[in-house]
Image: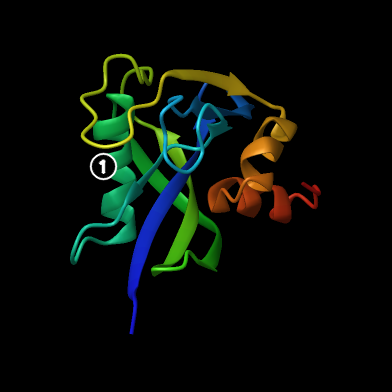
């Protein structure tokens, strides 16, 4: 039986404009999705609850505090040597402005960020297999 990897991605709403959400750009040397825009995410550790992983995204990836506010969707894919399950969680900012530049990231360090209303910016990542981007586009009935 193969391993299963669980992750969470956050759909972080801009507190100054609730129509905008945060996207981040993955590094050029990323093994799965190089140089594409997507949602901030982390792999769930051991017995960590998804909501705790959401808070960790804020601390580790965005150098701020965030809180989960709702479940948006979940997807599973067979990645060959493991099964991958990812859920998107709508989140709100409760700390300072997010910054991928100031974050002390352990694994994937994002190289850019921006607030946007344009869900189409997630199409490239979704077409390349990004589950977090696929979930957001699916719930908004946008093809990729």
Q: Is residue 48 visible?
A: yes
Relative horizontal placement of residue 83, taking residue 61 as reference (left or right)? right
Query: Compared to 51, does 125 lie above or below?
Result: above
Residue 139, image quadrant: bottom right
Image x and y of residue 57, in percent: 32, 39
Per the image, the residue denoted by label 1 is 56
* Image location (x, y in percent) of residue 52: 26, 52
Residue 11 x %, y %? 52, 41
Foreground residue among 11 and 18: 11
Hey, which quadrant is residue 119 in on the image? top right
How packed mark 1 is, by other alpha carbons closer than 10 Å (few <14, some 14-19, many 20 or more), is many
| Residue 129 located left or right of residue 54 | right
Q: Is residue 91 above or below residue 23?
A: below
Toward the viewer: 43 or 71?
43
Query: Quick one: which residue is furthest to the bottom in this view?
Result: 1
As displayed, is residue 1 above or below residue 35?
Answer: below
Query: How many discs appear?
Result: 1
* Direction from residue 72 to residue 98 in the image, left or right: left
Q: Nearer the viewer, residue 67 or 110?
A: 110
Residue at the location (44% across, 64% down)? 84
Q: Which residue does the image show at 52% across and 28% down from the upper left?
A: 22
Q: Circle 1 — which element? A: helix
- Quadrant of the drawing holding the N terminus: bottom left
What coloring was used for the rendering? Answer: rainbow
Q: In this orientation, does residue 14 appear?
A: no
Expressed as whole percent of the image width and height from the top left, the position of residue 83 reads 43, 70
Residue at the location (41% across, 19% down)? 111
């Amino acid at each position: 039986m193969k391993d299963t990897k669980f992750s969470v991605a956050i759909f972080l709403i801009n507190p100054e404009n609730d129509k905008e959400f945060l996207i981040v750009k993955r590094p050029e040397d990323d093994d799965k999705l190089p140089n594409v825009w997507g949602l901030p995410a982390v792999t769930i550790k051991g017995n960590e609850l998804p909501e705790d992983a959401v808070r960790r995204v804020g601390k580790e990836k965005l150098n701020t505090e965030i809180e989960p506010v709702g479940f948006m969707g979940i997807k599973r894919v067979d990645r060959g040597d493991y099964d991958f399950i990812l859920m998107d969680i709508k989140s709100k900012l409760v700390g300072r402005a997010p910054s991928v530049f100031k974050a002390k990231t352990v694994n994937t360090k994002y190289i850019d960020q921006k607030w946007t209303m344009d869900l189409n910016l997630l199409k490239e990542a979704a077409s390349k297999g990004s589950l977090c981007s696929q979930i957001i586009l699916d719930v908004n009935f946008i093809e990729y």
